[in-house]
Amino acid sequence: MGFEAVLFDCDGVLVDSEGITNEVFRLMLRDRGWELDEAECLRIFAGKAVRDEAALIEQRTGQPLTEDWLAEFRNRRNAALLEQVQAVPGVQPAVRRIHQRLEGRIACASGADRLKVELMLRHIALIDLFEGRIFSGQELARSKPHPDVYLEAARVLRVAPARCAVIEDTVVGERAGVAAGATVLAYAAPSPAAQSPEALRAAGAHRVFTDMAQLPELVL
């Protein structure tokens, strides 16, 4: 479609991490008395920053969401990711091809904290392609589903949002891309942790695809 820049989400798009993070989070909520199964936890929290859901977590657990608890969650999450996370199948050659054709006009725009994003990109050997173009919604006034992180990525790349493709895998992230004025292409992974193609289409995806090998042809 001839986009001038491609803005990638991280979790679920570049790395197969949603299920790993979700399990750590689910078990920590269980320890606080909120029992959720895997699917329900994903439905409530997928694509969202934990801090943004503080009121709900405090209501259901009856305990404050402290900085110490958040730090423990991040430490456990990062340890699990380093042990288990893998690149989304086919994403490494796809990203390298897009990076080359667009002369580096790609970015990673995530709702996650920067430490986590950089840890995972380094682990899957893609950090070099995104160096200097990694954006965290937690460093901005608002994170996803607000468009801020995608607007900031487009601004730094000096490309109008309307000329950007956003690659997402969650409804929350799609809403951020649509609100930014970009064209959203949704990746529906063949995974229990993935959101359904129907939900992704309903959230405003221009196209839903299921294989990262397809992506270069969709954006170049």
Image (cartoon, grey):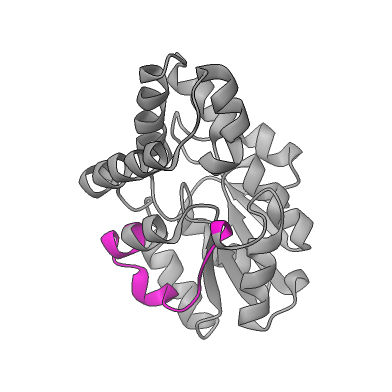
The quadrant of the image that shows the C terminus is bottom right
Depth check: give the residue in front, 72 or 199. Answer: 72
Which residue corresponds to the image point at 43% horizontal and 34% vertical from the top-left? 191
Which residue corresponds to the image point at 37% horizontal and 26% vertical from the top-left? 28
Left or right placement of residue 11 versus residue 145 in this view: left
Q: Position of residue 163 (x, y in %)?
A: 73, 73
Which residue corresponds to the image point at 50% horizontal and 82% vertical from the top-left? 104
Instruction: List the single residue furthest toward the left.
Output: 83
Above or below, 182 relative to 16: below
Q: Position of residue 18 (x, y in %)?
A: 43, 40
Q: Where is residue 60 in the image (x, y as percent from the top left)?
A: 56, 18
The quadrant of the image that shows the N terminus is bottom right
Left or right placement of residue 91 versus residue 50 in this view: left
Q: Can residue 188 be seen from the camera position used here?
A: no
Above or below, 8 relative to 44: below
Q: Can residue 159 be seen from the camera position used here?
A: yes
Marker count (numbered): 0
Check if residue 151 falls in the magenta segment: no
Give the magenta-colored segment's residue range.
120-138
Depth check: give the residue in front, 23 or 53. Answer: 53
Depth check: give the residue in front, 71 or 44. Answer: 71
Which residue corresponds to the image point at 30% horizontal and 65% vertical from the top-left? 122
Check if residue 132 falls in the magenta segment: yes
Left or right placement of residue 144 versus residue 49 in this view: right
Depth check: give the residue in front, 67 or 73. Answer: 67
Above or below, 81 relative to 108: above
Q: Position of residue 215 (x, y in %)?
A: 54, 60
